[in-house]
Amino acid sequence: MLAQPTPDTSRLSAPSEPGIVASVAYCDGRRVADIPVGEAGAWAAKPDHFVWIGLWEPDEPLLMDIKQQFGLHELAVEDALHAHQRPKLEVYGDSLFMVLRTARLDGESLILGETHLFTGKGYVVTVRHGPSTTYSPVRARCEAAPPLLKHGEDFVVYAVMDYVVDCYFPVLDQMAGKVEELESHLMRQPPGTAEIERIHQLRRDLERLRRAASPLLEVCSRLERFDLPMIDADIRPYYRDVHDHVIRVNEQIGSLREILSFAFETSMIVAAARQNDVTRKLAAWAAILAVPTAIAGIYGMNFEVMPELHWRFGYPAALSVIAVVCGGLFVRFKRIGWL
Amino acid sequence: MLAQPTPDTSRLSAPSEPGIVASVAYCDGRRVADIPVGEAGAWAAKPDHFVWIGLWEPDEPLLMDIKQQFGLHELAVEDALHAHQRPKLEVYGDSLFMVLRTARLDGESLILGETHLFTGKGYVVTVRHGPSTTYSPVRARCEAAPPLLKHGEDFVVYAVMDYVVDCYFPVLDQMAGKVEELESHLMRQPPGTAEIERIHQLRRDLERLRRAASPLLEVCSRLERFDLPMIDADIRPYYRDVHDHVIRVNEQIGSLREILSFAFETSMIVAAARQNDVTRKLAAWAAILAVPTAIAGIYGMNFEVMPELHWRFGYPAALSVIAVVCGGLFVRFKRIGWL
Amino acid sequence: MLAQPTPDTSRLSAPSEPGIVASVAYCDGRRVADIPVGEAGAWAAKPDHFVWIGLWEPDEPLLMDIKQQFGLHELAVEDALHAHQRPKLEVYGDSLFMVLRTARLDGESLILGETHLFTGKGYVVTVRHGPSTTYSPVRARCEAAPPLLKHGEDFVVYAVMDYVVDCYFPVLDQMAGKVEELESHLMRQPPGTAEIERIHQLRRDLERLRRAASPLLEVCSRLERFDLPMIDADIRPYYRDVHDHVIRVNEQIGSLREILSFAFETSMIVAAARQNDVTRKLAAWAAILAVPTAIAGIYGMNFEVMPELHWRFGYPAALSVIAVVCGGLFVRFKRIGWL
Amino acid sequence: MLAQPTPDTSRLSAPSEPGIVASVAYCDGRRVADIPVGEAGAWAAKPDHFVWIGLWEPDEPLLMDIKQQFGLHELAVEDALHAHQRPKLEVYGDSLFMVLRTARLDGESLILGETHLFTGKGYVVTVRHGPSTTYSPVRARCEAAPPLLKHGEDFVVYAVMDYVVDCYFPVLDQMAGKVEELESHLMRQPPGTAEIERIHQLRRDLERLRRAASPLLEVCSRLERFDLPMIDADIRPYYRDVHDHVIRVNEQIGSLREILSFAFETSMIVAAARQNDVTRKLAAWAAILAVPTAIAGIYGMNFEVMPELHWRFGYPAALSVIAVVCGGLFVRFKRIGWL
Amino acid sequence: MLAQPTPDTSRLSAPSEPGIVASVAYCDGRRVADIPVGEAGAWAAKPDHFVWIGLWEPDEPLLMDIKQQFGLHELAVEDALHAHQRPKLEVYGDSLFMVLRTARLDGESLILGETHLFTGKGYVVTVRHGPSTTYSPVRARCEAAPPLLKHGEDFVVYAVMDYVVDCYFPVLDQMAGKVEELESHLMRQPPGTAEIERIHQLRRDLERLRRAASPLLEVCSRLERFDLPMIDADIRPYYRDVHDHVIRVNEQIGSLREILSFAFETSMIVAAARQNDVTRKLAAWAAILAVPTAIAGIYGMNFEVMPELHWRFGYPAALSVIAVVCGGLFVRFKRIGWL
């Protein structure tokens, strides 16, 4: 992978027109010129040149312009206009269309963004939707490594994928932290409403993350399996590296799911154990408190002939009996663990 | 996909005879003539022409007539007569037989319809069963796009499939909305009979939807995998697009199942937590109410010698002791969260 | 499929000797002669002839006779003698051995029968075991369709398979009916012993049915996959039709399993909800009934100085307090839904 | 399969030296001579001869001797010395090494044994470990069928496998019996400690059995898939027969697991239902018993003016009220099924 | 496998410089010389020689030096610097990069280490991270077996893998012991906090172990599947042996998971059964204790006319009635098993 990505939500350069974040031509690994989108097709056609255009929620005319210059397929452009696609890789003739989902945590909530990527001979177009982070850091890092950037489009595609996939790791680490916190709480006491809500929210977020990340497995497999003309042999190990990261992301998601599900089951049994405790405690106190009532009830009877009532120490004796029986029960219940 | 489908349950044109919704010949992407079904075979045989017949619960003679004209296979026709098929794709020689299930929500209930589709050189026949919506909008949209319709039968088949599959999305969105509503309810309190019934109904409906949608995955794979003679290379990306939508439908169904199952488990634990609460509350109040009974019982005893009984402030003292003990218990139970 | 099968447990013709239900030679789709089993081999060898022998729990000598005439494989014959096989298809040289399990419901109980089928050039031998229904209706229907029966052995094999598979549908429909009945019961109240027993029985029966039906998937796949010399190209669509039915049977079994499992989980949560209700009711009544006891206890104390005791309306006042407090609690508990 | 195996734990002939159960040379399907192990290699090399050596927990020198004579692979011999292998099939050049696990029930407990089998041109060596039964009956049965034994080593290997696999069936039948017993018990009442322990033990035993039996599926597949030089085409159907039995064993294990798991869930719901019953009963009796206490409490109050106290039939009236209210509650609770 | 590995956490020889545990050249299966890392490339290039370098958490310059000498791939070296990789096998041209995870139990806690292994023509480099044990025993054992070590790099790689995999077995055995202990505890009584925590910890540890061990399955498959130039045919059976051990490790993990999950479910039902017991006990005692209260309450009423009060033996009679009813209830409850 490239150097550790630092998710950066600011933009390095303001777009020259709405929807365009950057539009640059490269040659031999070096930045040649900032170009207008309208000339992108011409630059892309120059030998050893390629252009890399970054868009953010472009409107239809802009996309149509780009479509025409690079000969993109109608269906791919339609997808890029509407967003809400699942991650996928489509091959249209000798151009590639890729959908990726980005992830980051904003406080407690998981934010999923969407990026579409068109590539072919001489061009890479990235289209961001919604709250996905800018790719300016990727561009900066690529430009800082001319020997690699010299490989051209395929290296840029790798760099974007690598950036997107590496953004999953901090999200997963934060989630794992939350899960661990929850676990240590649930182990000690049955879950309250807050814990139940958090566990449920985590499960839902993991499910959303899984849907964003798991189709990448197939995308990567296809990138490796197919002899795509636009991918150099030298670059292949880099794609395999991304694939490896994708596998790790998916394994971690799987593990977190498992662990949350363990935590859930553990909660159930903690709740059952606690219910047992409470019921036993209730039973024990009910028994202890029933004793004075019963004994006092007996000496509250109005029989004419009740010799104990006339004893001098009848009353303290009755109190003592009550105290002794209650105390005895208390000790006994303590001993068998009901209190 | 074509422009966003608007499910329309009305018919654009009344069928000329029972069971026939429309019967039209096309050439070069334009509507040529409304034709009687009896001449369909002849029109289909004209070079560059194809006919598109729409039927609704046809009777046996009508189907037999069509069978004879296009040389359909006996088994396919039998299936089309009886409905209750699972979605599938059968290849009989150089003709295709396809079964699709349509879905829509009518208020709370999920309505599944069934459509059978015969296609081959020069003809497309769609047979609707039960409450499936009419394909008139599909026909209107196809006729509005002659450059695409020019591709012929394979484009019509695509258009029908696209329409059927896109109808799943609003259904899934509504279901997702219901699930979310249920979730936020279940998180706060244990499920009552109404919620249990709704959760159960949703699970069943999802199961039905899954059975309708999941076989489409194989149908689409086979459409791509086979080199079916009737599908042009130009049209293939459109079929891949449908396939992609089918995958999305199935993923969403899977996700909703998961989430419903999470919601269910969450309900279990909320119910257990609530049971714990109630039992603890019960225990606490039982303890508090046992105190006056016990103390009053003691001073209701009839012993001759009970000095407290003769104290001037014995009675208020007793009442105070009761009040203090009960109050103390109350405060304590409040503090440990039992009340 | 052939016309809708009517399970018929009576025999059309009495067997001429124990174990033999019928033994008939066919030529060109027409019944030629009832033949003694001993001559079956000779008839099978005549050009364009084939024999179809139906047996019911034959003894060893009879099977050995048949084995010798058609050159069946020792292992297949052994299987046919002992029954209790799982459905399977074995190819021994140019002969096929098939095991099928039949299903029907006898009142509440699921009855699984077993049929073994030997076929090869010129012969079909069906061996029924236990309570499977006779194949006389199949024979009758085959004989009523000479154009199809003309295909020979492979059509007979198809007809038997089709008959066996189609018998699963009414069984599944009845089961689905029972499940639905159970569901609507379980939704309203927690399961009693009878419902628990029925739900458990249904799950077991479905498991048995699954074991009978799921191996047929592989049997059908192999019939399609292999270029079995004894199956004509013309007959293949019929086999595919059976395969399709087998898939449907298995999907319905899977769905019923799912739904039963949903019903089961729903029962759990209904039971938990009911437990909550009962405990709350118990708690509420305990609280209400504790009030008169506590108040009466207080005025039952024997203190010398208890002014209320000497009030004129002390007694009705006490009763009123009791009534008001109890009534107030009652109203409150009603309002929060505990009563 | 061969004739029904009778598990026989006695040895037919005493071993001539420790670790050696039998060492015999065969030719043309007939026993030629009991040979010393030291000459086994020489006998194996004679044309049309093969030797079959049976060992029981041999020491290292004995195994080393055999290793050298037949050129066994070091790793296979090491495995055979240490036992605790999982069932597997290894091919070393032109020799096979197979590990099988035998099963039998000793009263309540499942006993798993282990058998290692070396085979190659001219020899079969079986090595038993632990409590597995002797293979003398297999040898006896093989020797009784010279036409089959004539096939040589591959038939002996089949015979041993068949014997091992067929021993699973009585074990499974006994387990199924126990499961059925448990089921009918659990359906009627919640499980006690003994039932819980038995259900848990059965699940563990099934898991152990599964681990012993499921790898055989792959062993059999590989035996069929590979064109192993030592297996004749004539013998293949026999291997397929064993494979079929292995599939049946694994399906039965799967089914029993399912049924145990159903039984388990059924237990949970029976326990929940019973809990509901008990709580309701408790609530009902608490209510009934609270009535006399409350009423008696009221008439035990010491108010000066309590007219009822002076009524002639006040006491019996009070008793009657108590009786009527309690009786009324009792009847009502009976009617709603709480008692 | 080699002789039984004895995990040894001490180092046999102190590293000559930080990060280097050993750096040795071998020829013809014998140790030739301890070499400086800077000359490793030269030694590796000598015919029939290979070097084996052991590192422990090397710093970047050291790794870069080695990278340059053997021409390692940048991405592999990066992985080796950062650790936290999942087990994998990467082929870069004619060099292999392998990641393995080691496991051991330190008291109660599972310690996972990480080892990276580079190999190619003439060299093996092992890089240990974190708490993994030293490979000095592997080196010692290899050097003690020159005939095997003569095979060169591939044998060393096998020896390291074998060592790592065999270390899983004692870990699994200890875990199995703990599980068994837990099981016998859980069978007898519902789980307390300590047991719940231990069961949860075991499940998490097994999940971690699974993530460490399961990718090895694919690593081994790839080692067997690919015709890797650096692996001799003679060594292949050894790799298959490791593969077999990896399968066993994974099966044992799977089994332990199953058994823990059974234990968990068993706990649930034991807890439910216990809850039933406690509730019944509570109900029984509540009933018994309600009797004296009710009877005494009745004779505590102040009716003027209560004949029993004037009986001579009224009081003992009342006491007797109380005793008899309570005793009767006690006996009855004992008999039905509620007490």
Image (cartoon, coloured by chain):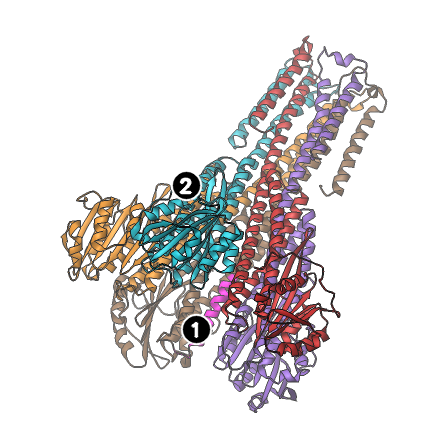
Chain colours: A orange, B cyan, C red, D purple, E brown
Side (left or right) of D33 relative to B110:
right
Q: Position of residue E159 (x, y in %)?
A: 41, 72
The residue located at (40%, 55%) in the rendering is A250
Residue mark closest to the camera, 1 vs 2: 2
Subunit of label 1: E
The residue wearing badge 1 is E239
Looking at the rendered structure, the kind of residue marked 2 is Asp
User: Quick one: quadrant of the C terminus of chain E?
Assistant: top right
Label at residue B8 = 2
Q: Is residue A109 above or below residue C82?
A: above
Looking at the rendered structure, the kind of residue marked 1 is Tyr
- Is residue E236 in the magenta section? yes
Q: Which mark is residue D242?
A: none
> In front: C136, or D92?
C136
Q: Secondary structure at mark 2?
A: loop
Task: Indicate whether residue D186 is drawn in magenta.
Answer: no
In the image as oriented, which residue stretches furthest toward the left? A33
Residue D168 appears in view: no
Which residue of the protein is positioned furthest toward the top in this rendering? C312
Which chain contains the residue that carries disc 2? Answer: B
Quarter of image, res D123 = bottom right
Residue A125 percent across, percent down from the top left: 24, 52
Comparing D324 with A24, the one in front is A24
Crowd band around label 1 with a 10 angstrom C-alpha radius: few (<14), some (14–19), many (20+):
many
From mark 1 to mark 2, how far is it between C-alphas?
A: 64 Å
Image quadrant of residue A271? top right
